[in-house]
Amino acid sequence: MSSIRKTPFLRSARLEQETLTFTVVILLALVLAVISPAFLDPNNLASLQTAVAPNLIVALGMMTLFMIGRFDLSVGAVMGISGIASAMALDAGMPVPVAFAAGIMTGAAIGAFNGLLVAYLGINHLIVTLGVLYMTRGVIEVVMSGQQLGGFTSFPEGFSMLGQWGFGGLSGIFLFSLILCIGFECYMRLTLPGRKLLFLGGNPAAAEAMGIARQRTEFWCFVLSGGLAALAGVLITARIGMANRYMGDGLEMQIFIACLIGGGSIAGGKGSYVGALAGVLFVTLLTNAFNLLLVPSEWQAVVIGAVLVLVLVADGIMVLRKRGRPWRNIFGLWPSRMAT
Amino acid sequence: MTVTQRLDDTTTRKRKPLLAGNGFGSNILALALVTLAVFALLALTRQNFATWQNLNSILFGVSIDFLAIVGFTYVMVMREIDLSVGSVFAFTGTLTGALLVGGWGFWPAAGVALLAAAAIGFVNGFLVVRFNINSLMLTIGSMLLVRGLANVLANDLGGQTYPRAFRSLARTNLFDIRITIVVMVLLVLLAWGFQRRSALYRKMCFIGENVKSATVHGIQVGTIKILAFVASAVTAGIAGIFTASRITHADVRMGLGLEFVMVTAAIIGGASLYGGRGDLRGSALGLMLLALVLNGMIMYDIEPVFQQFVIGALLIATVAFDTVLNRRSQ
């Protein structure tokens, strides 16, 4: 009897990797606070909040897709085009709610296009979303070719308020994204459709046999991802008061890495929204560290690529371990002697 | 009686129609006809198109890109993909240029750069084989990493032009034709023989069709895959050296988005994301077709910024065809 051990809470709640990431984030923050005096500056903290908020909103959509074993690389471009769409609607003299809806609808429509191709036609999701990334960037260039480099800048008061309200010294959109994150987490943990997402990613064939509509779920997850990316785009446009063609450039990779670090797996069936928060905090702090320590932007790309490779290798090793491979079989010298 | 009848039925049903082969454009003849049709359309409707200068520059551009697609196609045959080609292309070219600016000789510089490319390819292949990582994802990581390194080099050079001897490399002529075009023709002929005669190519197709079965039959899957990744990086590197010589100075935009042009061209040319086939002759024709379409867009005064949109749309369309055809054949 005594040999039966109680499962630790972190394991039963599937929060092991999330806890690890949070620990790393706290350590990183402590190190930054010690070595860079500018880190605890109120301005830097405020800019961190505004950097985390849109990333977190986008990461919630991405994490949903990770759970069902898909991902969406078009989010950065969707963010850009929806910000531009709402700015153009405002420019044409439409009221704020209509402009807001225009931005969201653009993103949701692109998400629906992704979902249609991936879920119903069965095309590889990486290729589809990469192609859509290219097409959307192309459309942004065409739309913005008449504008100056700065893009749209003057917005009515009501629209700017969407991004610039605050509460108790915290940025409003930061609070909003946190609330959204908690809401998603509750949905994933406490409701049946939320549990179905993880089930679908963990074993698609079994889930389909149990009567979960795989295609419909995938479709709506892509729409959700597009819609959330658009929401982030519109909010950040309102926050910084500007919509230009560079918004969200390269963001997809950051979000992707954040989700992987935060406990997601490209194989699906894993992940939590709290983990998305941890991953986003990590990536944002890393970028912030580069800026504070004045590292050139090219090296940032090198480090982000290296982190992605490392995370993928770690993910691969964990998958092999789960299949029951002993350590020496994974790191052994002779791959030809490995059992497959 | 009934059994033979049924057998007859299946054989007749399995016979392929003339223009729709095993995969999208796996029939080289059909692809060649389409390319010719586009060529004829452009030549008949646009006066500037069929000039010697324009055709020569299209062919020259295609021949350089073709060098990079050689290894890439054979990686795709094995159901893997190498998205880092564009970055390796830029990195190798810029590294060669940087070493030459630093006073090295051409052969040492090119050798070191190609060794670096081979190392990148080896790491890609090794990680994919050993840890069973999805190559799509892994090579996106190495794409970012290598692109960052290439940009570091390019920024250090700050737009300096390369030495004269290096700049004239791409303009070397053999029998009055650019040397890369001659190399392309030779490689296509070689690939033809390789694909018809070589056991290695059959093994690669087997790996692409069914990895487990190939392993069981004693094919050294890991070794062949790693070699293909190394080959992909090295051929991309050779193309990168020629391109660096052609554009004469360090440029951060070099080879940007090349990998997607290559996926599209390879799939048009008969390769498949689902592995098991791929044809270098088809890839060459695919690149040619893409170059003609892009050139035609310029001829028709379509905004150049629209090119990105067209490449994305073509990528999705070809992969959609690939998927639908694969599903039907299964």
Image (cartoon, rainbow, N blue to C red):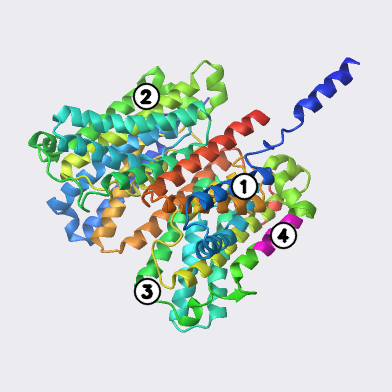
Same subunit, tags 4 and 1: yes
Mark nearer the viewer, 1 or 3:
1
User: What residue lies at 86% left-to-right and 19% top-to-bottom?
Assistant: B5
Residue B76 coordinates in the image, percent (x, y): 61, 48
Subunit ID for the residue under disc 3: B
- Asked if badges 4 and 2 are on one and the same chain, I answer no
Q: Which residue is mark 3?
A: B157
Q: Report the residue marked by disc 4.
A: B189
Q: CA distance from mark 3 to mark 4?
A: 39 Å
Disc 1 secondary structure class:
loop
Tell which circle, 3 or 4, labels the residue nearer the N-terminal end: 3
Q: Nearer the viewer, mark 2 or mark 1?
A: 1
Q: Position of residue B177 (x, y in %)?
A: 61, 71
Give percent across and percent down for residue B71: 62, 57
**Measured Cα–Cα span from mark 2 to mark 1:** 47 Å
- How many residues crowd around disc 4 within 10 Å: few (fewer than 14), some, or many (20 or more)? few
Are both tags, 3 and 4, on one chain?
yes
Residue A8 appears in the picture as rendered: no
Q: Are marks 2 and 3 in contact (CB under 8 Å)?
A: no
Say which chain tag 1 marks.
B
Q: Decide if residue A262 is on the left or right side of residue B69.
A: left
Q: Which of pointers 3 and 4 indicates the residue nearer the eye?
A: 4
Which quarter of the picture shows residue B309? top left
Decide whether residue A229 is among the magenta residues: no
Q: Secondary structure at mark 4?
A: helix
Q: Are marks 2 and 1 on the same chain?
A: no
Tell me the chain of label 4.
B
The magenta stretch spans residue B190? yes
The kind of secondary structure element at disc 2 is helix
Amino acid under disc 3: Leu
Camera-nearest residue between A21 and A208: A208
- Quadrant for the C terminus of chain B in the image: top right
